[in-house]
Amino acid sequence: MEQTRLQRVFRLITLLIGNHRNPLELAELLETDRRNVQRDIVELKNSGFVVEYRNRHIPFLSANEGSLKEISNLVHFSKEDAYILHRAIDSIDNSTALKQNLKRKLYNLYNYPWLAEVVVKPGLGAVVHNLSEAMANEQCVILKNYHSANSNAVSDRHVEPFRFTTNYEQVWCYDIADKQCKLFKVARIEAVELRQDAW
């Protein structure tokens, strides 16, 4: 199994524990198609995991029997648990590599948008939050005082944000002025102004 697929299956396991998502929602979260999700669920069943269904089409893993019984307490955190971990990790000295490793592990397990502040540098949480909101509502934004690495210029960019890269490091946007899709580094964005105009 290739590494990206292995990572997807591990994320699928965490998403199936105590959550209520249909296969289409799971596919979107895992950045794959519904067919791959269904194939991975069949493989989990064949490996001894007990997969049950709510309303005939919402899968979840039973922690009461099968392979999951031994690991369920190790991999599942509620949103409240994750929030407490977020605060605890923030209290670690910024200079340690341990802090960054813990942030990445928490992000890889739980892709809650509000956990972005754990992953990105302090102070960028509001930028990521506003970009996430714009993506959800399919609305345009102004990237205020964007510091371009290519031209060394600082300018506002009118864009349509549509996807983050891993760990919220960069954001894919359609640049309205240049009429093309571009990657913008989140750390180079001073602020994000939400606009009323839709994509």
Image (spheres, rainbow, N blue to C red):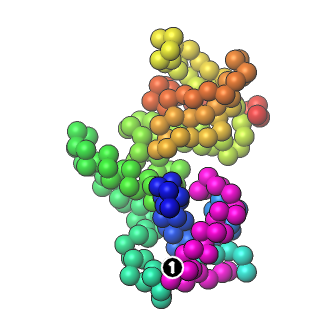
Q: Which residue, given by chain and number where applicable, does mark 1 sit on?
A: 47
User: In this picture, is 10 found above or below 167?
Assistant: below
User: In this picture, is 37 found above or below 73?
Assistant: above
Query: Label 1 amino acid?
Result: Ser
Secondary structure category for the residue under label 1: loop
Residue 54 % position (x, y): 67, 80
Can you tell which quarter of the image residue 32 is in? bottom right
Residue ranking furthest to the bottom: 65
**Along the viewing direction, whichever of 17 and 8 lies nearer the viewer:** 8
User: In this picture, is 199 found above or below 15?
Assistant: above
Q: Residue at x 59, y 18 (%)?
A: 156
Q: Quadrant of the C terminus?
A: top right
Q: Residue at x 41, y 35 (%)?
A: 123
Residue 63 % position (x, y): 48, 83
Magenta residues span 28-54
Mark 1 is surrounded, within 10 Å at the Cα level, by few (under 14), some (14 to 19) or many (20 or more) other residues, namely: few
